[in-house]
Image: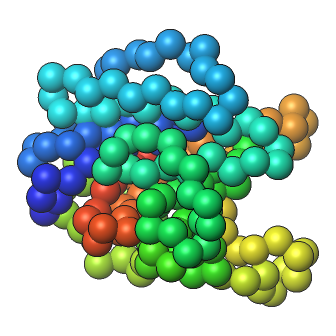
């Protein structure tokens, strides 16, 4: 069971909670954000909705889940001040090839966000160096495998999030559950 852990619906725009019992959230936050900015709002049920703007093509937006804040580590690869970073559709973890924070993620198949109460036995993974596809890009844990976090629509060149729940082990060793919603 998640113990005093935040759970997020990540929306790039991020959404989550900090409670023993985790309930769905219906909070809506203003979508007008500065590039690289974030807004977080805690509701009565312990849910946190965080909207995060990561639209810049060159700059990463580093996020620390325990403080619900965007941070600016001087040397991100050696910093424990961030858990995940976002740049357009890329999501990197502070672990593997991107940092020393040992952050890992597990995709939880076949469950709804509000129904997940336990840390799964799923395989946790982290970011790796470019693998089989040899396209020169790192293999981001959130985009790797048969089901990256998004569905790409070739006709409209747009992304929409898959209805997947993730469990993330943070730099602190705590676990969060997360769903990308927008």
- Name the residue located 75 percent from the left edge and 48 percent from the top edge: 59
Instruction: Specify the quadrant that holds the N terminus.
Output: bottom left
- Name the residue located 64 percent from the left edge and 35 percent from the top edge: 36
- Specify the farthest residue to the front: 74
Residue 40 is drawn in which quadrant? top left
- Residue 66 image point, x, y percent: 31, 50
84 left or right of 173? right
- Residue 174 image point, x, y percent: 26, 65
Q: Nearer the viewer, residue 98 or 164?
A: 98
Q: Is residue 170 at all visible to an observer of this figure?
A: yes
Instruction: Specify the quadrant that holds the C terminus.
Output: top right
Q: Is residue 114 at all visible to an observer of this figure?
A: no
- Name the residue located 19 percent from the left edge and 63 percent from the top edge: 118
- Residue 149 image point, x, y percent: 60, 54
In the rendered view, would you say 23 is above or below 34?
Answer: below
- Name the residue located 50 percent from the left edge and 13 percent from the top edge: 30
In the rendered view, would you say 123 is above or below 36?
Answer: below
81 left or right of 44? right
Residue 133 is drawn in which quadrant? bottom right
- Colour theme: rainbow
Residue 131 is drawn in which quadrant? bottom right
In the rendered view, would you say 99 is above or below 108?
Answer: below
Q: Nearer the viewer, residue 110 or 66?
A: 66
How many numbered callouts? Answer: 0
């Amino acid at each position: 069971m998640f113990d005093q852990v935040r759970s997020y619906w990540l929306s790039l725009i991020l959404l989550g909670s900090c409670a023993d019992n985790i309930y769905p959230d219906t909070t809506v936050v203003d979508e007008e954000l500065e590039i690289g900015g974030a807004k977080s709002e805690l509701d009565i049920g312990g849910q946190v909705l965080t909207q995060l703007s990561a639209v810049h093509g060159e700059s990463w937006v580093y996020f620390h889940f325990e403080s619900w804040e965007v941070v600016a580590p001087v040397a991100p690869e050696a910093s424990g001040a961030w858990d995940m970073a976002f740049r357009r559709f890329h999501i990197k973890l502070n672990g593997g090839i991107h940092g020393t924070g040992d952050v890992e993620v597990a995709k939880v198949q076949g469950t709804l966000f509000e129904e997940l109460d336990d840390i799964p036995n799923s395989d946790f993974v982290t970011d790796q160096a470019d693998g089989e596809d040899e396209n020169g890009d790192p293999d981001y844990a959130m985009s790797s495998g048969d089901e990256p976090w998004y569905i790409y629509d070739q006709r409209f060149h747009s992304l929409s999030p898959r209805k997947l729940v993730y469990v993330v082990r943070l730099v602190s060793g705590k676990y969060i559950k997360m769903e990308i919603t927008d």
